[in-house]
Amino acid sequence: MRPRIPVGSPLQILLLACSFALAGYAGVRLFADDWLGVALWFVGAAVLHDLVLLPLYAGLDRALVRAAGRRREWISYVRVPAALSALLLLVWFPLISGRVAGRYALATGLSADGFAARWLLLTAALFGGSALLFVVRVRRATKDRPPAAH
Amino acid sequence: MVHGPLPGVARAYGRGMARTPFSPAFWRSPLRGPRLTSLLGVVLLGGITVLFLTGLLSYAAYNPDLSPVNDKTPDKGILGFYLFSWPTDPHWLYRLNQGVHVTLGITLIPVLLAKLWSVVPKLFTLPPARSLAHALERVSLLLLVGGALFEFVTGVLNVQLDYVFPGSFYPLHFYGAWVFFAAFVAHAALKTPAALRNLRQLREEKDELVSPEPAEATVSRRGALGLVGGGSLLLLATTAGQNFDGPLRRTALLAPHGGAEPGTGPGAFQINKTAAYAGIDAAETGDQVWRLVVVGRTGTVRLGRADLLRLPLHSAALPIACVEGWSTSDQWWRGVRLRDLAALVGYDDPPDVLVESLQRRGAFRRAALRANQVADPRSLLALFVNGEELTPDHGHPARVIVPAAPGVLNTKWVAHMTFGDL
């Protein structure tokens, strides 16, 4: 009787079997102490990214595109600084939010206060730079246009 | 970046058929396609390979096979197959290795996010498996994506001292790296030939990543790549500076060891753990009380600070380099050579040493150094830095400083040294 599910490439199966063997060897050690916690983090990271973070930023981007309506040339001037600012917040969230401020200041002897302010200033600079670029481009476009087009 | 609407919104859009993520028409971005994914994949292939290799080197730098006190992963088994005696030359070796590991990791975050975005329709492919090989590949992809995110997230949290992950950083990041790498190698072997083919071709092939009903473009693919590259550059520019002293450190605007130096004067350089954090009691470090106990073949020697000052003092210009990916420039240390201390207790040919600190807390309050590290003439039990006595936060009354060693092996507030083969 033919198997109902086709087997596929034997070379690929062999390669993946090797990969699973090594991952299993390291995995039993990774899971040795707190298997549930580690499993939650391992799978949770993928699930949170694919089903929460990605739909969230994609949804926000769609909302931006819809809000822009026919003025599509505006979109990038909001999208780029917003994305860069969000990226910085995502990476440095523990420091910016101040959730590790106590430990950080005690351990390093440095002030934990400046991170939120610096992130806000960077965000302001990103949006400010984008706005400036937009104004410059709009003015240049108006200048280049022949008077009859007004 | 344009992207399919959220599942709830999908029904309002549907022309006749209900669009869920499982339908190819749900994914409408005109940016997706084999070329974009291949380009991002090739960047990650190179970048993650460097991350893995510098990670393995960083692990070896702790000399985990030397002594249980250095080994946070005692059940590593064959995963420590490549371990070797960590050298002391060049003296900036660990500084470079770890600076590259952490800075590159942070720089690659936008590329990783973009890569995951570019392939997300494949997560919802139906049927779930076309063949046994395909089913196994999809299981492997869970290890790949989960592993990549696990490694990046634990690394990013650890450098910010946010220890919320389930266990100690060393075993999680080390074993997690091997799980991830196992899936990464398989994925690279299966996909790299096609990725290179996609990049060489002039016209893009149609595959399941290309949207069947693309929305109107609001940005070119070049523009989207520019955003990813710009994100990487922004992270690089605001992080790399934490590996240099002076004005360059101030450019690391959001990195944990960017900005100002702690305090003023000769001791104003970066601190991993302060005396207060380590639980050092000033009553234990005063000249009247503190004694260094040195144990060796010929017995035990107790040395006060004045006794140490009568021994030959030597200088070495060495950096502090932390596993967290920050470092200082070379500082000018002055103190007694470790090999002179070994000779004091009967070892003319320097052996290994176990160093114990006064500190109450910390995974590395005891640390072992290998014979080659003890023998290096630049390896000191330092009493001074930059021309002044050590400050409490830099390990007063005495600290170890060894060329090319990870910061935590340069034990501060040293109380006890046991020479002998470990």
Image: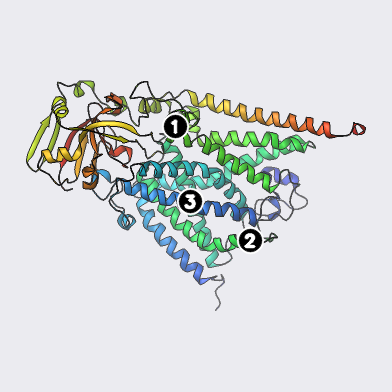
Left-right relation of B216 to B353 = right
Share a chain, discs 1 and 3? yes
Residue type, numbered disc 1: Pro
Q: CA distance from mark 2 to mark 3?
A: 22 Å
Q: Is residue B334 above or below residue B10?
A: above
Asked whether residue A41 appears in the rendered view, the answer is yes
| Quarter of the image where the N terminus of chain B is located | top right
Q: Residue B178 in the image: x percent, y percent? A: 40, 54
Residue type, numbered disc 3: Ile
Tag 1 near tag 2, CB within 8 Å: no
Give the mark nearer the N terminus: 1 vs 3: 3
Who is closer to the viewer here, B156 or B371? B371
Quadrant of residue B122 within the rendered picture: bottom right
Please tell me how crowded label 2 is: few (under 14), some (14-19), or many (20+) other residues with Cα within 10 Å.
few
Q: Which residue is mark 1?
A: B256
Give the mark nearer the N terminus: 1 vs 2: 2
Residue name at image x 33 percent, y 41 percent: B406
Q: Which residue is mark 3?
A: B48
Q: Which residue is mark 2?
A: B200
Please tell me how crowded label 3 is: few (under 14), some (14-19), or many (20+) other residues with Cα within 10 Å.
many
Give the mark nearer the N terminus: 2 vs 3: 3
